[in-house]
Image (cartoon, rainbow, N blue to C red):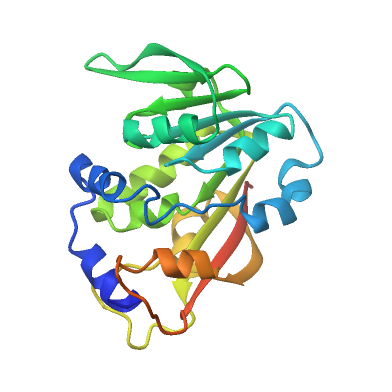
Amino acid sequence: MDTRDNLEHIATCDFESKETWEQDWNTADDPMFHLKEVNAMLMKHYKAFTGGRKGLRILVPLCGKSLDMIWLADQGHSVVGVELIRKGIEAFLQDNKLTHREECVTLSPEIQGTIFKVDEKDISLYECSIFDFSAAVAGGQFDLIWDRGSMTAINVMKDERMKQYCDLMLSCLKPDGRYFLEFFAPESTEGMPSTFKFISEKALNERFGDRCTIQYLGTEKMSEEEATESEQPGCEEHEENPFLMHYYFMDFK
């Protein structure tokens, strides 16, 4: 199954369902979206992202077991990840040999969640739906948001979820905060499945343009690791990957 076929399959999945996300964690040690290294563009644009400051609060939505959280904490920041699937949080802790303590958190009058607080580093992981999360739950707004692929995942949900997500992210960001976004899209939509919804700069302007300035940082070829992970197990060969990773800063006007 090549990447295009895989996208057609993804478009048929119910990403409103927790079971869909759990399946990805249960069928492989490393889920399809996991990158086994720190994101190169995060490191490249780190100084501009942080303004050279230390001690910032950074939100990582749909964090999985991203190594970016370790790296950001090691730069002197307080990192908060949000992950729906407990197995993803446990894998992050186990893979990085981290000890932790668990605390219950009230997300709403009807919904309880769990916070995993890492002992060795300033990292806290919320086990909950991103739509049950808020700045109030986390104890205040964030200086920065690092969105590596989270918006892409939300975009394949019901249409109203994208607006809800964008509004949520901006509500979590301080007035002088910065939103660093990564998403993937093909160099050309020709031959791509019409059932899969890609993010575009036009869509970003429609969602954020009234409230934010949008700075284009460039694109990178999808890494060989990401290209391989985007295919189904058992594929020994894959065609040249037609996708680019797109990067943007967004700041309030």
The one of 57 and 39 positioned closer to us in this rendering:
39
Front residue of 213 and 59: 59
Seen at 63% across and 47% down, the residue is 251
Quadrant in which residue 130 is drawn: top left
Depth check: 8 or 23 in front? 23
Residue at x-position 21% and y-position 16%: 110
x, y (%) of residue 138? 48, 21
Q: Please indicate whether residue 126 sits to the left or right of residue 43 in the image.
A: left
Q: Along the line of sight, which residue is nearer the eye, 14 or 64?
A: 64
Going by the picture, which residue comes out furthest to the right? 52
The residue under the point 38% across, 37% down is 88
On the rendered image, what quadrant is the N terminus found in?
A: bottom left
- Percent coordinates x, y for residue 93 in the rendering: 48, 29
Left/right of residue 200 with respect to residue 87 in the rendered view: right
For residue 142, above or below residue 202: above
The x, y position of residue 155, in whole percent, is 34, 57
Count of numbered badges drawn on the protein: 0
Q: Position of residue 63 (x, y in %)?
A: 46, 40
Rendered position, 206 above or below 174? below
